[in-house]
Image (cartoon, helix red, strand yellow):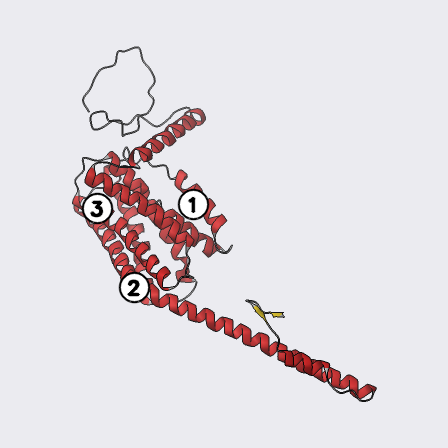
Amino acid sequence: QVCSSHRPLLVRPAVLLATLHMPLGDGGSSSGAIGDAAGTATEAVGASVGAGAASDHTDSAANIAKLTSYSWNIFRYIGDYLHLFGIVALLATLLKNKSCRGISRSTQVLYFCVFTSRYLDLVDHSQNAYLVFFKLTYIFTSCLVLVIFWKLDRTYERQKDTCNLAVIFVPCITAAVLLANEYSVLEMLWSFSQFLEGFAMVPQYVFCYRDRGAKDIGVMLYVMSLGGYRVFYAANWIYKKVQMPQYSDMQSWTGGVIEISFFCDYLLSVFTGTSVLRAMVLKVDEKINELQDRVELRVLGSSRPSRPQVEGGVGELRKRRAVPTEEPAVDMDV
């Protein structure tokens, strides 16, 4: 049994028999005959290994071609254009309102990191025009949105954009290092982007949970489009799995399941007023920020200023600890 780089190959018995049953003459000629037979056997084994490797390469190329053909399906196209529509809705909303109100800057930072870490393959190998267009568009628009936030910084609602990004980045980096298919820079960055995208909309959902009175249609279209795009991508993965049972992409599937879970809970909150994850997400967010305040107070000697409470004191905006005074508390309408 001779092993190639992919799988074991069996040497034909006739090759071994030809080596073992060569006729012997005198000493010199018998050595030459054995040498010739050994050379013949070696060439035959090499040819067998080469044929096996070529067969493996052909099978691999056929599987890749088959997977590629199934990748271009209606679910993927709808997902791609829904994603593009969401970005256009976001830019139109920002420019129309001349304000960042209703939009989480933290989500835009996360998407910028997702796109720049995932699409480094643009400089690694050539791709068709469709992929190049979408990848460059995502990178360019994510940069443009951050520039708009910088220009309209005075309209940015920091008190509602409370999600701590470190709590998202650290687990995603850890998962990318541990679960990457291979330990190359591009592969680990791609895995990181898949895990990170699963949480990219979480700051926006937290923002919306704290801003329940807002009725901006543009913001609603943006959030719905970004969540819906992942739903159609999940349908794309299911379709490919049905067509090719050997297809597997655990990093994408994991990020997709996480993001769709948050999106479904957001839809439940919007249309029914009830939510499974809303209270938990806000509670975790508040605890994390309280811990951050204590660390800042211990290290820097001060914490961030108090932030107002909205919606009649429901307690959905995190409250900062204030220094107690001797003056009696005065009830104020906010």
Dot 1: what SS?
helix
The furthest residue to the right: 27
Q: Nearer the viewer, residue 326 or 331?
A: 331
Q: How many marks?
A: 3
The residue labelled by disc 3 is 94
Instruction: Measure how far apart labels 2 and 3 are at the Cα level.
Output: 32 Å
Q: Is residue 59 above or below residue 124?
A: below
Instruction: Measure how far apart labels 1 and 3 are at the Cα level.
Output: 29 Å
Q: Tag 2 or tag 1, which sits nearer the N-term?
A: 2
| Dot 3 alpha-carbon crowd within 10 angstroms: few under 14, some 14 to 19, many 20 or more | many
The residue labelled by disc 2 is 73
Mark nearest the camera among 1 and 3 is 1
Mark nearest the camera among 2 and 3 is 2
State the mark number for residue 172. Answer: 1
- The disc labelled 3 sits on which kind of residue? Leu
Residue 196 is situated, as x and y percent measured from the top left of the image, at 38, 47
Dot 3: what SS?
helix
| Dot 1 alpha-carbon crowd within 10 angstroms: few under 14, some 14 to 19, many 20 or more | many
Q: Is residue 8 above or below residue 291?
A: below
* Residue at image coords 33%, 20%: 322
Question: Is residue 96 rendered to the left or right of residue 181?
Answer: left
* Residue at image coords 35%, 50%: 256
Dot 2: what SS?
loop
Asked whether the viewer can see residue 113, the reply is no
- The disc labelled 1 sits on which kind of residue? Cys
Instruction: Measure how far apart labels 1 and 2 are at the Cα level.
Output: 29 Å
